[in-house]
Image (tube, rainbow, N blue to C red):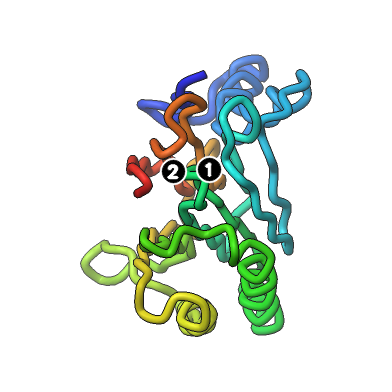
Amino acid sequence: MPILNLTRSIVPGIAKTTKSNIQNVMNMPEMQLAKLIRQGNKNIVKVCMNECKAVRIIPNRIDTIYTDGLAGCNSLGVVCLGKDKNPIVILSHYTPLEASRIKQAETLEKQLQVYDEFIDRSVRPRVYYNVPGYEAENGQLKPCVNNIFEKVSLVMKKFFGSEFDEKTVLYPNKGRSAFFSSANIFQFDTKKTKDMKITFVGEKEHFSTIG
């Protein structure tokens, strides 16, 4: 199955009827994935708050890992290429508390220890931060005070030295519309597992090829 198009061209406002509002909720990316899980889809893995999971993306098995309910929390995704040429994804979602940031870095390190021997070192791993920002005077989002970057970088350097890339995508924590998506979703093509689509909070899309 190819990568699903979960994002909406327009985020709707509150409708006059309950039926329409319920439909608008069900059309949110995270709700579409939750529905597929309820229908028995075994290819989707959900990461809850204060949790970290790792998956190997293998054709006809796992192709999607996601978390939702991000409202001031930090979501961290690390994507590596396995020696079998299929991606390995580590995704976590923790609160912004200092103890949680420490835990987020610790759980990343534990997962990297588990998968260390399976990672293809010829391909630079990628770190994706989906974290809250505040609106500056120019209207642009700026990172909130958040030392998760430093903690995660130290862990990555322990395993990969300087051979990894980082990307930060900020999301607004205030002034959200009624049906604003709070999900961070990593999807892979089931036939071409190196093809990846990330849907960050607020449905910001990022397409990439691993390796």
Would you call the spot at circle 1 few (<14 residues within 10 Å), some (14-19), or many (20 or more)? many
Residue 198 image-quadrant placement: top left
The one of 196 and 9 positioned closer to us in this rendering: 196
Instruction: List the residue tagged with mark 2.
Output: 198
Q: Who's the residue at 59% across and 55% down the image?
A: 70
Q: Position of residue 107 (x, y in %)?
A: 69, 71
Would you call the spot at circle 2 few (<14 residues within 10 Å), some (14-19), or many (20 or more)? many
> Which label is found at residue 185?
1
Q: Who's the residue at 66% across and 82% down the image?
A: 102
Q: How many marks?
A: 2
Task: For the residues labelled 1 and 2, say whether their Cβ atoms are less than 8 Å apart.
Answer: yes
Q: CA distance from mark 1 to mark 2?
A: 5 Å
Residue 108 image-quadrant placement: bottom right
Q: Who's the residue at 71% across and 82% down the image?
A: 99
Q: Who's the residue at 38% across and 44% down the image?
A: 204
SS of the residue at dot 2? strand
Residue 115 image-quadrant placement: bottom right
